[in-house]
Image (tube, rainbow, N blue to C red):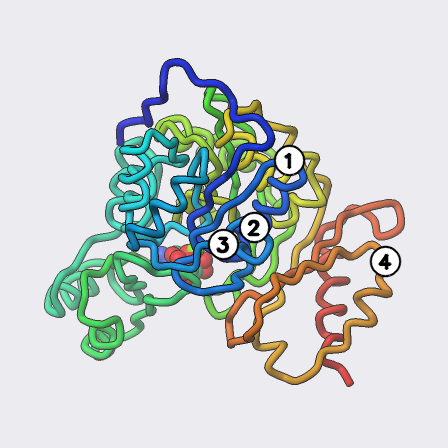
């Protein structure tokens, strides 16, 4: 990948300028809230919906598809810079921005690469980053051949537009190949060996226009049904492993010429770190940075894309627990215990409709004198509070 070329003479966008956000979800909402705190204005292109989590707190919500040229023009009329809270989108907004002379951070090339699992893995391997053994398959017989080559089990993932475990399946037997091929929609797939990991970790790294790099340390993540459920920081890994993980994230950010924020998900294995995937934006494993760091992942994104220096991203020990739609489907929730736990930070994303697996909000607890600094203890406390939401 060619690092993004930046205009030779660029001045930071001052407060009062407008940040154009592609995507209307909760990541855009938290970026918008930070941007407002810093005196910036916000315009959101939602992809179609109205009253989205991001759009409902923005100065301007453009409720239109990502490939709607008139909507893109409206966005570019008000936005002084474009950034992303969602990468699985049509790239015409980036091309239109380029024509209009509006900066796009991270670059369209980074977004295009991370939209496609095969392009992403190739780009990572080109810069010497380890990924699980993988191949691309275009037909059912190629899938069967890949399963024979890698050995069972394997994970097959739609090459494009997968998230939260959607568009992927684990294949445990040779007989399951035909069914998996059908279920994934008979489309181009990336097939991967299953990595026997000890834990999953992630590093959210920011890079400024001047090439300054900062991260928030290593997050340790637990997934339930392929959706991130909880994060603790620091991850329970050695100092050396942590340095290695942060080094990998910085290497990717530098080699790709990133401007903005990027999350690198990794498997920690007895023989080393293996990168699972990269997201070119803030990530839910970085939510605890809002309270645990002086500069959150959203503040780092803001600072990077307006051309300001990065802030201090170092985190206090903390835990984050996601609140998924499933909880809300069980009936009215009792919030009293969460409000009674005075140190707990509650975030709700303002989504009107709960669906199974949909991210509705999260809880964060930062270590202090009363609760201590053991992230596992912080997480246990959040788990019992989440449990209490539905205990009646
Ligand atoms: N090659 C693999 N080996 C072991 N587990 C995997 C592998 N690929 C994915 N997973 C599991 O599935 C989860 C979701 O996969 P991921 O590729 O991150 O997709 P998504 O884009 O849906 O987050 C991972 O966090 C991990 O728990
Ligand atoms: Mg993932």
* Nearer-N-terminus badge (1/3): 1
C-alpha gap between disc 1 and disc 3 = 18 Å
Q: Is 235 on the left-hand or right-hand side of 63?
A: right
Dots 4, 1 in contact, CB < 8 A? no
Crowding at mark 2 (Cα within 10 Å: few <14, some 14-19, many 20+): many
Mark 3 vs mark 4, foreground winner is 3
C-alpha gap between disc 4 and disc 1 = 29 Å
Q: Which residue is mark 2?
A: 58
The image position of residue 77, as x and y in percent, is 40, 40
Q: How many numbered tags mark residues here? A: 4
Residue 124 visible at all:
no
* Nearer-N-terminus badge (1/2): 1
Q: Which mark is residue 342?
A: 4
Q: Which residue is mark 3?
A: 61
Q: Residue at x 57, y 72 (%)?
A: 352
Q: Is 73 on the left-hand or right-hand side of 118?
A: right
Circle 1 SS class: loop
Q: Which residue is mark 1?
A: 39
Quarter the C terminus occupies:
bottom right
Q: Is 86 on the left-hand or right-hand side of 152?
A: right
């Amino acid at each position: 990948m060619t690092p993004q070329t930046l205009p030779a003479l660029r001045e930071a966008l001052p407060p009062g300028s407008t940040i154009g956000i592609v995507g209307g979800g909760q990541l855009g909402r938290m970026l918008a809230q930070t941007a407002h705190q810093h005196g910036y204005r916000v315009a959101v292109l939602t992809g179609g919906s109205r009253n989205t989590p991001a759009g409902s707190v923005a100065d301007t919500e453009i409720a239109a598809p990502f490939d709607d040229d008139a909507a893109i023009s409206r966005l570019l009329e008000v936005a002084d810079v474009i950034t992303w809270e969602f990468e699985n989108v049509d790239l015409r907004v980036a091309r239109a921005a380029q024509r209009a002379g509006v900066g796009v951070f991270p670059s369209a090339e980074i977004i295009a690469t991370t939209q496609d699992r095969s392009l992403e893995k190739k780009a990572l391997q080109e810069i010497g980053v380890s990924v699980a053994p993988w191949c691309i398959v275009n037909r059912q017989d190629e899938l069967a051949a890949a399963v024979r080559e890698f050995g069972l089990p394997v994970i097959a993932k739609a090459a494009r537009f997968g998230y939260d475990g959607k568009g992927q399946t684990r294949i445990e037997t040779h007989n399951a190949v035909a069914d998996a091929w059908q279920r994934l929609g008979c489309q181009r797939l990336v097939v991967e060996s299953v990595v026997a990991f000890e834990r999953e970790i992630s590093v959210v790294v920011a890079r400024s226009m001047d090439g300054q790099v900062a991260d928030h340390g290593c997050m340790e993540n637990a997934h339930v049904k392929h959706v991130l459920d909880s994060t603790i920081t620091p991850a329970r890994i050695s100092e050396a492993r942590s340095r290695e993980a942060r080094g990998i994230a910085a290497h990717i950010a530098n080699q790709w010429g990133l401007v903005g924020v990027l999350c690198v998900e990794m498997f920690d294995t007895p023989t080393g770190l293996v990168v699972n995937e990269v997201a070119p934006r803030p990530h839910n494993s970085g939510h605890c940075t809002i309270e645990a760091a002086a500069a959150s992942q959203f503040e780092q994104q803001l600072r990077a894309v307006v051309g300001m220096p990065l802030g201090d991203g170092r985190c206090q020990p903390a835990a984050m627990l996601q609140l998924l739609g499933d909880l809300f489907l069980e009936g009215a929730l009792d919030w009293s215990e969460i409000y009674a736990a005075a140190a707990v930070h509650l975030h709700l994303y303002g989504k009107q409709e709960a669906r199974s697996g949909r991210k509705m909000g999260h809880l964060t607890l930062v270590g202090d004198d009363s609760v201590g600094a053991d992230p596992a203890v912080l997480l246990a406390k959040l788990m019992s509070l989440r449990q209490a939401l539905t205990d009646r």
